[in-house]
Image (cartoon, grey):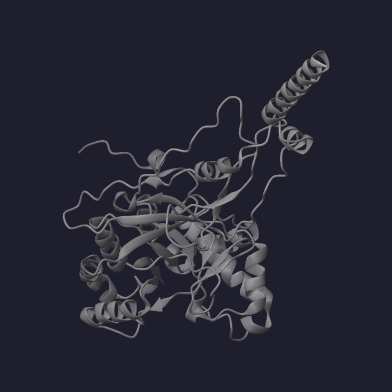
């Protein structure tokens, strides 16, 4: 009997030991075959649609915020390829600024990224905006941001008429000027801008540009953005333009060609309608030309105001109510040119920041309308084809 009891006890002991070994092996083994499959086959890329045709490409040093470096995955756990869209702005609420998109690495991934790797990958996806140099002019306002406008399809801006693309943050201002270039006034406006290390957008009348191309060139050389404002400031919502799209196209395209010739270089595919009258069929045409339309957020009505102090008051009062905006002024108006230094001083004192718009691509002129502009030059001479340096030479000074 004792022998039987000893044998049974030994068998029970061996059985319990074997059960423990099996349990320990299971605890150390991979969770399931499903986990193995998910490691081998990476998840499908996430694609977030682009929000709007505006992207930040430069930012002032004051508003730069240091960002923590993204954690790098270990060699054993390479990050899965994820295409994503991320706001170019480092912080704050989501705006319609153009989102930056990462390139998907070539070739298949060896394993899926850990769940917590998506956030660092997203943070590293959008490169930081380039820094804008601090203003070296005493008391200068300086630029806060530079945004790039993708004009594909002819987007429209300015909340007075178009609500979709409101890309400005609180206390940000875009300065725009219409109807130039004009002697005396445009150089005064340019000096005030340069004295404050800031830039603006000029919507020039083609005919004015042909009269004084040197003024257009000076703006371009100073880094200002130059768009167009028709050939001769015709209201395209009135006859004959309202009933004849071809005449409306000619008024627009001759303006584009003339400003382009005056600058003698690239200009922006930015357009503002005279009197802010924007016929739907003409806007459709601008879309086919990939030219953006600009209305305004704040109209100073400086064309009705003659005293510089009243121009300043109009702009500051409306800005205080709106909080930000694309500001419409005219370098054609002498009162505005005189008022600008004081307006910029008050903008700085009130904490406003200046944003500059640049195009992603320059506008392309059409040869048909280039020829029409050349035909307007009544003072040209077919014999004047040689460059001036080969015709006129200083021989004594």
Which of the 4 image quadrants contains residue 125? top right
Residue 65 located left or right of residue 382: left
**Residue 307 visible in the snapshot:** yes
Q: Is residue 170 above or below residue 356?
A: below
Q: Is residue 38 above or below residue 379?
A: above
Q: Percent x, y for residue 47? A: 67, 51
Q: Is residue 321 above or below residue 136?
A: below
Q: Percent x, y for residue 106? A: 69, 32
Q: Percent x, y for residue 163? A: 53, 75
Q: Percent x, y for residue 247? A: 64, 75
- Outermost residue toward the top? 3
- Outermost residue toward the front? 1
Residue lying at 48% horizontally and 79% vertically, measured from the top left: 160
Closest to the observer, 350 or 206: 350
Q: Is residue 45 above or below residue 263?
A: above
**Residue 361 visible in the snapshot:** no
Residue 36 located left or right of residue 78: right
Which of the 4 image quadrants contains residue 366? bottom right
Closest to the observer, 215 or 312: 312
Quarter containing the C terminus: top left
Residue lying at 65% horizontally and 38% vertically, measured from the top left: 81
Quarter containing the N terminus: top right
Residue lying at 46% horizontally and 69% vertically, measured from the top left: 205
């Amino acid at each position: 009997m004792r022998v039987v009891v000893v044998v049974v006890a030994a068998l029970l002991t061996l059985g319990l030991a074997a059960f423990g070994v099996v349990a320990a092996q299971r605890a150390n083994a991979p969770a399931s075959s499903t986990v193995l499959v998910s490691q081998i086959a990476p998840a499908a890329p996430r694609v977030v649609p682009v929000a709007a045709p505006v992207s930040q490409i430069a930012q002032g040093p004051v508003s730069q915020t240091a960002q923590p470096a993204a954690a790098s995955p270990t060699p054993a756990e390479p990050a899965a390829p994820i295409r994503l869209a991320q706001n170019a702005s480092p912080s704050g609420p989501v705006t319609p600024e153009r989102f930056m998109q990462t390139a998907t690495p070539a070739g298949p991934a060896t394993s899926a990224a850990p769940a917590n790797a998506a956030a660092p990958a997203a943070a590293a996806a959008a490169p930081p905006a380039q820094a804008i140099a601090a203003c070296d002019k005493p008391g200068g306002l300086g630029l806060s941001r530079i945004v790039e406008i993708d004009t594909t399809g002819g987007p429209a801006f300015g909340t007075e008429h178009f609500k979709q693309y409101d890309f400005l943050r609180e206390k940000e201002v875009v300065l725009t000027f219409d109807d130039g270039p004009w002697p005396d006034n445009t150089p005064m406006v340019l000096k005030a801008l340069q004295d404050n290390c800031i830039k603006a957008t000029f919507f020039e009348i083609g005919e004015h540009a042909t009269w004084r191309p040197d003024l257009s060139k000076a703006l371009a050389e100073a880094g200002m953005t130059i768009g167009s404002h028709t050939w001769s400031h015709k209201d395209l919502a009135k006859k004959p333009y309202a009933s004849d799209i071809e005449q409306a196209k000619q008024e627009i395209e001759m303006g584009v060609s003339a400003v382009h010739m005056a600058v003698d270089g690239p200009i922006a595919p930015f357009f503002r309608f005279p009197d802010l009258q924007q016929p739907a069929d003409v806007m459709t045409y601008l879309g086919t030309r990939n030219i953006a339309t600009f209305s305004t957020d704040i109209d100073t009505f400086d064309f009705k105001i003659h005293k510089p102090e009243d121009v300043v008051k109009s702009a500051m009062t409306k800005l205080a109510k709106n909080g930000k905006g694309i500001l419409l002024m005219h370098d054609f108006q002498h009162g505005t040119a005189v008022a600008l230094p004081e307006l910029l001083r008050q903008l700085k004192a009130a904490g406003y920041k200046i944003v500059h718009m640049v195009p992603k691509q320059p506008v392309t002129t059409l040869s048909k309308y280039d020829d029409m502009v050349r035909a307007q030059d009544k003072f040209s001479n077919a014999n004047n084809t040689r460059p001036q340096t080969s015709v006129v030479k200083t021989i004594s000074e």
